[in-house]
Amino acid sequence: MVTDPISDLLVRIQNGLRRRHEVVSIPASRLKRELLRVLENEGYIQGVQADMADGHPVLKVQLRYVNEAPVVTGMQRVSKPGRRVYVGIKDIPRVKNGIGVAILSTSKGLMTDQESRRAGLGGEVLCSVW
């Protein structure tokens, strides 16, 4: 049993990038699927495919490399099970001065920091990717 599934997702992606894997397998959930959709839209991963492994649903994440270097150089979990981090619209963080992206869970679903500023929504800051 994993107590923090989002941290598990981020660590699996980071470990796959460090080992130069093409595909990483992650146990499936709706939240993880949405988080990966945001990462795919932002260009940090190539794609996501739903699959079954040992009778359990998994997500196969195709990692993205440019000139044999990983596109993702860092990931950080912001809001954790022991310390939730909620922000209003004025306090939405900028990651690496706009180069990276913060992913927020809002009342309208998961979105990036830029999308939530445009929509005028605050929420829980799940993670930062750069």
Image (tube, rainbow, N blue to C red):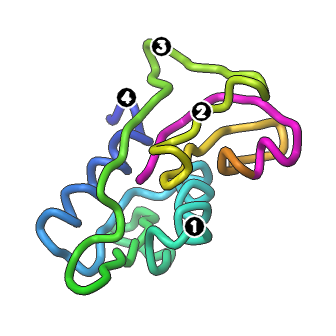
Distance, label 3 to label 2, CA atoms, is: 17 Å
Check disc 1: other Cα within 10 Å, few if <14, some if 14-19, many if 20+.
Answer: few
- Mark whose residue sits in front, 1 or 3: 1
Residue identifier under label 2 = 93
Q: Secondary structure at mark 4?
A: loop
Of the numbered discs 1 and 4, the one sitting upstream in the chain is 4
Q: Nearer the viewer's eye, disc 3 or disc 2?
A: 2
Task: Indicate the position of residue 84 as horizontal and vertical percent values.
Answer: 54, 17
Residue most extreme to the right: 120
Asked whether disc 2 touches disc 1, contact meaning CB atoms under 8 Å apart, the reply is no
Q: Position of residue 68 (x, y in %)?
A: 20, 83
Q: Kindly identify the amino acid type of the residue bearing the numbered disc 3.
A: Arg
Placement of 32 over or under 63, stated as above or below: above
Q: Return the residue at label 3.
A: 83
> Cβ–Cβ below 8 Å for labels 3 and 4?
no
Lower position in the chain sequence, tag 1 or tag 3: 1
Gap in angstroms between the C-alphas marked 1 and 4: 27 Å
The disc, 4 or 2, on the residue closer to the chain's N-terminal end is: 4
What is the span of residues highlighted in magenta in the rendered image?
115-130
Residue to which mark 4 is pinned = 3
Front in this rendered view, residue 22 or 72: 72
Name the residue tied to disc 1.
42
Query: SS for tag 1?
Result: loop
Of callouts 3 and 4, which one flags the residue occurring earlier in the amino acid sequence?
Answer: 4
For label 3, the SS is loop
